[in-house]
Image (spheres, grey):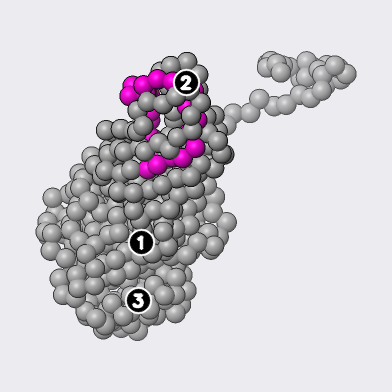
Amino acid sequence: MHAAALTAAGLAILQADPAVSRVDVDRTRAAEGTPSDTDYSSQWSLPKIGWNQVFGSVNPSGSAVVALLDTGVAASHPDLAGSLVAGTSIVDGSSGRTDSNGHGTWLAGIIAAGTDNGAGIAGIGYAGVKVMPVTVLDAQGLGQDSDIIAGIVWATDHGADVINMSFSNPGYSPALQAAIDYAWARGVVLVAATGNDGSSAVTYPAGDRGVIGVSNTDQGDALNPSSNYGQDTFLGAPGTDIETTAAGGGYTSVTGTSASAAEVSAAAALQATDPSASNGVLVGRLARSADPAGTAAQTGNGRLNLARAIADSGSESVQPAGAAPLGSGGPLVGPYVAAATSNVSFAPATSTAGSTLTYTVSFRTSGSGALIAGNKITVSFSPGPPGAFSFNSTTPTIGLTGGFSNCLATSTAAGNVVTITLANNGVLVCGLGNSVQATLTIAGVVNPAAGNYNKLDFTVETTKD
């Protein structure tokens, strides 16, 4: 292949030359991942969650609807044109397409503002995601449980894939939980803000079973001082100085767990454009793929990572357990772990040449999060003496104890490496947190030579597909 600058005459000569198979235009191509929206540079949270890695490269073919249970949405905003589907107002019986408070319009912009339209901001749900306005809060941003319950049921019955609830109250309601159960049983992903009191006190609906409670993280992945946290926190997401649409037209910057919940709802909706994944599978992907940020109390499974969640093909279903009185938070299946190796010991330490033994490997996890179902553990034997370890089977028998007690495993062996894939045991979730002692046994290891292997270069590394 050759590149050249040609005149029209020169081009004609090359095209007529039988030795030249083809002449192509040397086109200029623009890098993907940056939309034309004029205020995109102010949207720090989008690259933080990996949005720029999927925009321009991942093009959802399906569609998904986020029911925004809030103060309504100002449908007249130019950056929300074409972003809404039919909704309702439980409060006054209208269509939900006006917003006398502004809160709902803020969240609608975060979720589904027009993207790459040369104006304003980019919505996280850049393709296939629509907002269903369901007004359950009044002009002061207050709402009754009865209206919220009616809104959940209405949204579920009218095709919502995700329900966003950016409001909170410390009182548990069995009736509200029943409505949430109704939506969950029909495949809806439910997301709620934990609140903005800087408190660890549980609020609802974030603390209800089946709801992703979301805390507010800042540009440095720290918990915003105003953000609530604790048992009701399942994920963290950016919610500090978030640029979005304003009800009176134009744009504004908002801070709070309401914005954080909207980011998670939009991410869930982008995933939900794949109709083959259940709500539990979508929740599991969001949790497993999260980035480490703060403590488990502050961000639950970690801070939202949209790019990794979109790439996750895992099928393990996860339902948020909720806080008291129904649960104690979690389950914690994240954040994502790239590697975990520490304090490895093994036995037997000596052997005769060519002997086939069962090795017991004990180690303590390190790194930034939990080892979970779907992780692969790679065990590499690299002996000090000459020669190479091998195995008497391509599927060595694996034993799991200690921190692995809730896990099943399958294995494959090639060369001197065993790859072990973890799975849930059918009853309990397989998972290991930070600094957890675990033991695995590997049968059928053929030693290369006699000697003492206390100095064996033995590694245990976990990776997530």
Residue 373 is situated, as x and y percent measured from the top left of the image, at: 41, 52
Q: Residue at x 20, y 47 (%)?
A: 295
Closer to the camera in the image, 5 or 398: 398
Residue carrying label 1: 428
Picture layout, residue 445 above or below residue 195: above
Amino acid type of the residue tagged 3 in the rendering: Asp
Q: Which region shows up in magenta?
A: 440-465
Mark pair 2, 3: CA separation? 60 Å
Residue carrying label 3: 181
Residue 71 is situated, as x and y percent measured from the top left of the image, at: 28, 71
Amino acid type of the residue tagged 2 in the rendering: Ala
Residue carrying label 2: 449
Residue 454 is situated, as x and y percent measured from the top left of the image, at: 33, 24
Give the number of the mark in front: 2 or 3.
2
Amino acid type of the residue tagged 1 in the rendering: Leu
Q: Dot 3: few (<14), some (14–19), or many (≥20) neighbours within 10 Å?
A: some
